[in-house]
Image (cartoon, rainbow, N blue to C red):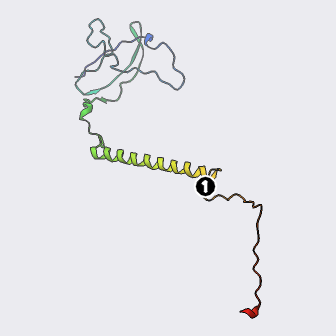
Amino acid sequence: TPAYMTLNTTLLNYPCPKPDGEITVLRVGSETSCAHDPSRPNCNGPLPKNPGTYRVKFLAWNGSSPVAETRWSEPITLRTAQHPSSIAVPGRGHSGGMIALTAILSILFAILLAGLLAMLVFWGSDTCGGSSSFSKPEAVSVRRYNTHHVYDQPAARL
């Protein structure tokens, strides 16, 4: 035999009209704080813990007479949720070897980048007017220079 559960709510729960294209949603079981409060018989508490098939129907009342109602929904099957730690997730942790390899490669990459940066700074300083072993020598001026002549020897003396 089917069981029925009645949830009363008022327009006060939906004070603002929704913009076009949006729908108003009544989430069944959203009030967990009043689930065991006897002073709130119409609490929108969680459904019973046993999983099963449910169907829903909505009625709009004006006082004590219904003014609109929906058809019964298709069956909605609820399942028991699993504890998050029991769900197998592929690739869920990293091994110690993988962490060590990642750390070593990160350090080597940082050293490589530092060496490249130092090389660019060193070579960049030479090309922008810095001192270099390949620079053009200064012009030398000599005030006095004595030339030495080699006199032609007569060919006969040879």
The image quadrant of residue 137 is: bottom right
Closest to the observer, 21 or 62? 21
Vertical side of 122 occupied by 32: above or below: above
Residue receiving disc 1: 132
- Give the residue furthest to the bottom: 156
Q: Secondary structure at mark 1?
A: loop
- The quarter in which the C terminus is drawn is bottom right
Closest to the observer, 63 or 120? 120
Vertical side of 18 occupied by 87: above or below: below
The image quadrant of residue 91 is: top left
Residue drawn at the location 50% of the way across and 14% of the way down = 16
The location of residue 66, given as percent across then percent down, is: 40, 12
Closest to the observer, 22 or 127? 127
Vertical side of 123 occupied by 31: above or below: above
- Relative placement, left or right, of 95 versus 60 is left
Residue drawn at the location 35% of the way across and 44% of the way down = 103
- Give the residue furthest to the front: 157
The location of residue 43, given as percent across then percent down, is: 32, 12
The image quadrant of residue 139 is: bottom right
Residue drawn at the location 46% of the way across and 14% of the way down = 14
The amino acid type, in three-letter code, at marker 1 is Ser
- Relative placement, left or right, of 23 versus 147 is left
Residue drawn at the location 27% of the way across and 43% of the way down = 96
The location of residue 145, given as percent across then percent down, is: 76, 66
Closest to the observer, 92 or 50? 92
Counting labels gives 1
- The quarter in which the N terminus is drawn is top left
- Relative placement, left or right, of 99 versus 69 is left
The location of residue 25, given as percent across then percent down, is: 42, 21
Q: Residues within 10 Å of mark 1 (few under 14, many from 20)?
A: few
